[in-house]
Amino acid sequence: MSFWEIFAQQLFNGLLIGSFYGLVAIGYSMVYGIIKLLNFAHGDIYMFGAFTGMVALGLLSPAFGNAWLGIIAALLITMVFVGLFGVTIQRVAYRPMLKAPRLSILITALAVSMIIYNSMLLITQGQARPFRTGLTHESFFIGPLRLTETRIVLLVAALALMFLMHMFITRTMYGKAMRAIALDRDTCQLMGINVYKIIAITFFVGSSLAAAAGIMAGVYYGTIHFFMGFLIGLKAFTAAVIGGIGIIPGAMLGGLLLGLLEAFATQIPFVGTVWKDVFSFVFLILFLIFKPTGILGRVESERM
Amino acid sequence: MAEMKKSSHSPKKYPAVIDQIYNLFDNNVLRYFTFFIIISFLIILPQTSSRFTQEVMSNLFFYITVCLGLNIIVGFAGLLHLGYAAFIAVGAYTTGILSAVYGINFWATLPVSILAAIIAGLAIGAPTLRLRGDYLAIVTLGFGEIVRLTVRNIGITGGAIGLIGIERPVIFGYVLNQITHFYYMFFILAILAIFTSYRLHNSRMGRAWEYIREDEDAASAMGINVVSARLYAFIIGSAFGALAGSLYSAKMTAISPESFMFLHSVMFLLAVVLGGMGKIPGVILGAAIVTIFPEISRDIGQYRLIIFAFVLLLLMLYRPQGIWPDRQYISTKK
């Protein structure tokens, strides 16, 4: 393969993986922006979404003649279901802790993550599961780029979800309320915003986007397993930090950037696929050292 | 006020029983007598007990050492550390590589392993300790993964299979290879860890840590160098872990990357939080619960971690300060 072929291919792969990272990172970033919590369970919600999607697909796809229709139906149902799951977690575990010391709520998030992770480990017996979509994987070429229909649809769908999310944040009352709470929760309460309701909506949206990313990853890789959430949770956090944590467009940008970095890192001699995860974490640490506010972040004058 | 609002996170009075036990131990004679009894019991224990008990007990001593190290970072200095297993791995692999590959005497590897932990602690702590606590949590988590992936992927550590053939320690020509020997080795280590922890807690640095934990800005205003004090906590805590890791590798004679996973970091943290952050007897209690509970509940096997996580969740909701917290515990931070 020539240089340009590799370049185009990695560019596409990077964008696709990066859009998954971005979708998960949005949830991370929103929750951090609004209640200053690193939601460790978010990666596990992504994994939970992938498994819920698998079950939903198994139930729904016979009912639809077309494979894509089945996937879309499963995607929507899963997003709603996992969104509600996220809200439940928030209600049970995080809401009582909102006024607690920061360390306590962080440990609570860790405990929730352990519960989801180990429950899924028990249910699946630690086995990877095939994600059967019934799609054909015929590849074709556009210029130097080897593509499949599935990949194009996935990329378009991920970017569309990001765009919708951006619209939601910038154009709706709920989005406005979220941004206001991120700035100052107590004042929002005084202004008559139902803070708990907005936090619940945040968790709903974040979890459903993570679930969507989980299903897309299932379609893309063809198998899902119980530990798929741990690494992507870390990666999504990295993406959120790169973009500027708490800033939604930053999370998307950071996700795409991290995806591209990883895709190109696999082509660097001595890095390869084995070291690409190490590469992203080193990148995270470097970013935290030199620009902790991220690409789109502003310097905070107040200290916590 | 009759209707004083009860918040679960404001400073709480302990239940009367715990308070009474506390007051009981204010009496020095009674305290030292109790210590004497416990220590004598633990010294005699291997003479009368089975291999299994000794195995569990030496495991417990290992956990006590590790958790006390983590307690310095999390409990004393208030820095959430989620990659502590990586520092144990640093110690274990330093000793492992030096003794298995280069054939260096076990005792000579100990200073090297502490040095390695200090370097690792500096490498990860120096740039990140200026940041807020949450970032540190994720950086340490990322560092843990970096260490695990690195030892998986390079040749000298034996890759995913791990390192085998680590040499047994020798004292005066006498090879330590029985479980009883390791029982005493870990026992001495745990005693040292407890002693050092107490000394650190009462030292100038220990008070600085406590002060920073409660109010960083005030501490800084009073002239405490926050970053360097945190860095000390980080390095000293890491050294504890590395030392425990070295002994662990000598006991096991074989180590693999899977012994130092994120899960283990979580278990150590769980022990510290469960017992009571910053309180040395509390941490020992937490370590004992985390080690002994799985042994006596083998039947529930796989459900263990889920139950543990639920316990942790409930504990955070209803008793965030742990079972046996520091008496001066005040949670003012938001």
Image: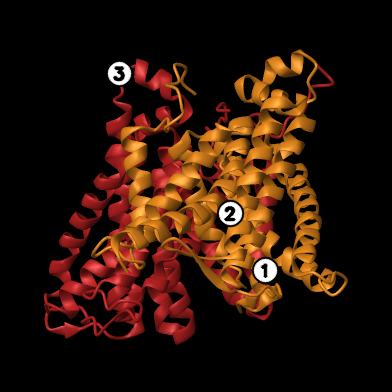
How far apart in space, not on screen, are marks 2 and 1 (Cα)?
Answer: 28 Å
- Which residue does the numbered mark 3 point to in the structure image? B223
Dot 3, how many residues are within 10 Å of its Cα: few (below 14), some (14-19), or many (20+)?
few
Determine the colour of chain A. orange
Which callout, 2 or 1, points at the residue further toward the start of the chain?
A: 1
Q: Which chain letter matches label 1?
A: A
Residue, disc 1 = A120
Which residue in the structure is indicated by mark 2?
Answer: A155
Q: Quadrant of residue B212?
A: top left
Give the letter of the chain under mark 3.
Answer: B
Considering depth in this image, is A232 or B223 the residue closer to the camera? Answer: A232
Colour in which the image shows chain B: red
Seen at 38% across and 45% down, the residue is: A284
Label 1 packing within 10 angstroms: few (<14), some (14-19), many (20+): some
Q: Residue at x 65, y 75 (%)?
A: A136
Q: Nearer the viewer, residue A209 or B95?
A: A209
